[in-house]
Image (tube, grey):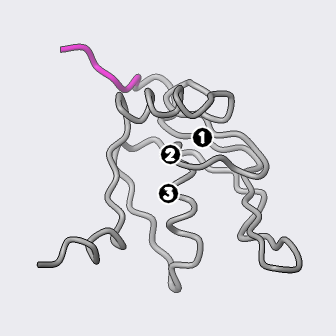
Amino acid sequence: MEKLVDKQVNIIETKNLGQIGYDIRRGFHIWSSIDLIIKSEKVLPLSENRFGQNDLISLLAGLDTPSTGTIILNGRSLTALDEDGRASVRNELIGSCFPSLFNYCRD
């Protein structure tokens, strides 16, 4: 079986990553200027208040596009791809579990 992840490159790298949210009157920074290198195949983001966690996971998985910056996944620029391209990369490389989805799985 062919290895999907190249161990010679960073699995995920972000440069100057930022996300802007909007309310009725103006935009606001959810976070900005994130430079991140992930070398592990499994990641669990933790924070005290969970603010922005789902947004960050969505960006790193290619489910959303950042307001600023670039995301490189296994040597490929996610931010340079269209939705179909990101879907193809997700299908090949990404597995994620969003805790909020468990709310919809109750009997």
Q: Badge 3: few (under 14), some or many (20 or more) residues near its Cα, within 10 Å?
A: some
Compared across the picture, whether 34 is left or right of 54 comes to right
Report the magenta residues as a range: 1-6
Residue 77: percent from left, percent from top: 62, 29
Using the image, tell me which numbered label, if any, was put on residue 57. Answer: 3
Instruction: Tell me the CA gap for discs 3 and 1.
Output: 13 Å
**Residue linked to disc 2:** 38
Residue 13, label in figure: 1
On screen, residue 86 versus residue 29, left or right, reads left
* 5 magenta-colored: yes
Q: Secondary structure at mark 3?
A: helix
Q: Position of residue 94 (x, y in %)?
A: 37, 40
Mark 1–mark 2 contact, CB under 8 Å? yes
Residue 32 position, x and y percent, is: 77, 62
Percent of width and height locating residue 31: 72, 67
Q: Nearer the viewer, mark 3 or mark 2?
A: 3
Q: Amino acid at mark 2?
A: Ile
The residue nearer to you, when weighing 51 against 41, is: 51
The label nearer to you, 3 versus 1, is 3
Q: CA distance from mark 1 to mark 2?
A: 6 Å
